[in-house]
Image (tube, rainbow, N blue to C red):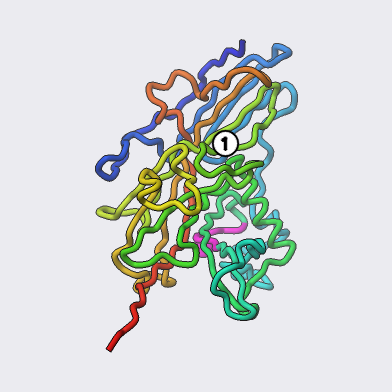
Amino acid sequence: MLVLALLAFAPAVPVSAAPGSEVGMPPGDTSHTSGFEGSEGQSCFMYANEYGFGAYCPSAGGGIGERITIGEFLGVEEERFWQLVPPFPECWHKDLPPNAQSGDLAPGEKRYVTNCIENYDELHLQEDTPRDIEFSTSYAILPPHEVITLTPEQDELIEAAWESSTFPPTFIEVRPEDAARVNSDTRFFMKVQDASEIRPGEVQYMDTIAVAGIEMRAYLHRLEVHPEGEGDGKPMVFCEGADIMAADAATRQSSPNSCWHRYTRSSASQPDDVYRAQGYAYWQVQYREGPGDDWTNFPEGTPTQSEALVRRGGLTRVPVRDVQTLAVP
């Protein structure tokens, strides 16, 4: 039996929430660390925080690798992205697969995922690391001449930033996909991007990883969305477990416990003509000694499950359009 010794635990503190929601969800800096005896009697450690989860045995040479700055990664001496030649783009686009290219598209247009660096102006390339980059995501329909792509070197940095966490990015997807509509139902959900299989209507698990003689995984326990950004008086919705990833054809009636919201105003008056929806994915990390053993929540012994969860945030840009009506004389 694997015996854990709790070394350090930052408890969750209550946070304000909308009526009917659960309070006491963990803040972003929640961190869990426990020691355990490895298969060969060595001292090992298991951890989970917003950057990921895993285990390592210092005596076996394991541990967290040396951090390098963005400037060191790119091999540049400049301090800001815009000082680079060519400048590092603030936003860029990636193709969506062919099965996402259906619908009303003008000749030559395609659907893209748009990624943006939200803290572009604040990052100091010689002090900040790739995991300090804060992203937002959205969808766009664009003609070829408006598409911005990354160079291979730039793409390597972004991949390093994505991979700096064991957890996938908190990419909140929206339906309708192209733009939400005023006074219409908008559904927010999240796919576990690196899972081998995505099954709508089921709890989403990350693929199991083998580390330091044990197996670990995490599942998406809760999704919290602030559709119009965070702030006093702004709405918040949440959904849990199998309700996070409903089927594509889901409606508020068929899946009432999914994350639904109705915008009452378009995004025309918002910066960049979009609402910046803040999302938080709450992960439950689990471990076991090997295949066939039961999974155990990590860390053990917390007063409530909420205090065991790890929170990871992300922004999604949501355009909201007025519903166009046909004028009849």
Q: Nearer the viewer, residue 252 or 265?
A: 252
Q: Nearer the viewer, residue 201 or 97?
A: 201
Q: x%, y% of residue 101?
A: 61, 67
From the viewer's perspective, tell me whether residue 67 is left or right of residue 104: right
- Secondary structure mostly seen in magenta is loop
Q: Nearer the viewer, residue 87 or 310?
A: 310
Q: x%, y% of residue 310?
A: 48, 35
Q: Tell me which corner region of the image, top left, top right, bottom left or bottom right, holds residue 44.
A: top right
From the viewer's perspective, tell me whether residue 245 is left or right of residue 197: left
- Residue at image coords 33%, 62%: 263
Instruction: Name the residue beneath numbered marker 1.
Output: 205
Q: Any magenta on residue 119?
A: yes
Q: Tell me which corner region of the image, top left, top right, bottom left or bottom right, holds residue 231.
A: bottom left
Q: x%, y% of residue 117?
A: 54, 61
- Residue at image coords 26%, 53%: 232
* 10 Å crowding of disc 1: few (<14), some (14-19), many (20+): many
Q: Amino acid at mark 1?
A: Tyr
Residue 215 visible in the snapshot: yes
Residue 92 visible in the snapshot: no
Q: Quadrant of the C terminus?
A: bottom left
- Residue at image coords 48%, 51%: 314
Label 1 sits on a secondary structure element that is: loop
- Residue at image coords 67%, 48%: 68
Q: x%, y% of residue 73?
A: 70, 54
Q: Tell me which corner region of the image, top left, top right, bottom left or bottom right, holds residue 125.
A: bottom right
Q: Any magenta on residue 189?
A: no
From the viewer's perspective, tell me whether residue 171 is left or right of residue 70: left
Q: Residue furthest front?
A: 329
In the rendered image, the vertical position of residue 166 relative to residue 5, given as above or below: below
What is the magenta range?
Answer: 116-125
In the rendered image, the vertical position of residue 182 relative to residue 65, given as above or below: below
